[in-house]
Image (tube, helix red, strand yellow):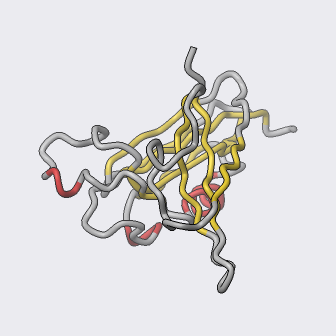
Amino acid sequence: MNQLIRGYIYTFDSDSRTMFSLSVLLLTGKFATHTVFTDPCVGTNKYLAISYFCLPPGVRSSLVCEHATSALTCDDGTVIRIHSANYGRTDGSTYSAGQPASQLAKTDCYALNTQTVVASGCEGKSSCSILASNSVFSDPCGGTFKYLYISYSCVSKFL
């Protein structure tokens, strides 16, 4: 059974102590080498840190392409709780129909403010709408056709 884990590769250079993070999808049984992941800093020692969390039952998701609006809704007596969100592109196939290959090639595209923007607009509300747009999230990867993915659940508003 393959288990999907989101991890980050951190590298440090001795002069600027710059940290690079690369979100990766790691299937169990794979080794973290430059042949599996790209090498962001050739000649620099790296390590792989992995974090994960289990999503509760009843998790919902919303996926809309760039320039569309994501509408999240919960039943009466419940409110939205955001688990994760990304505006960008993490694969070459989602919303790819009719798009030139050059706009689908970059698949390590993450708007770092997505979770904060979505949570501030939706968390604790019974419904909300978020536009999947560079004007809302900034442009994490110019020239790439992006989409907005949101994972959320509806929880009792009395918790």
| Residue 148, x across and y down, in percent | 43, 50
| Residue 79, x across and y down, in percent | 70, 40
Q: Is residue 131 above or below residue 155?
A: below
Q: What residue is at 42 percent from the left and 67 percent from the top?
A: 140
Which of the pair 125/92 is nearer the observer? 92
Task: Give the residue furthest to the top.
Answer: 1
Which of the pair 41/113 is nearer the observer? 41
Q: Is residue 143 above or below residue 157?
A: below
Which of the pair 24/147 is nearer the observer? 24
Q: What residue is at 66 percent from the left and 85 percent from the top?
A: 15
Picture quarter with the N terminus:
top right
**Numbered label tally:** 0
Which of the pair 17/62 is nearer the observer? 17
Q: Is residue 56 above or below residue 95?
A: above
Picture quarter with the C terminus:
top right
Q: Answer with left or right where residue 42 lies relative to residue 126.
A: left
| Residue 27, x across and y down, in percent | 55, 30
Task: Give the residue furthest to the right.
Answer: 159
Quarter where residue 4 is shown: top right
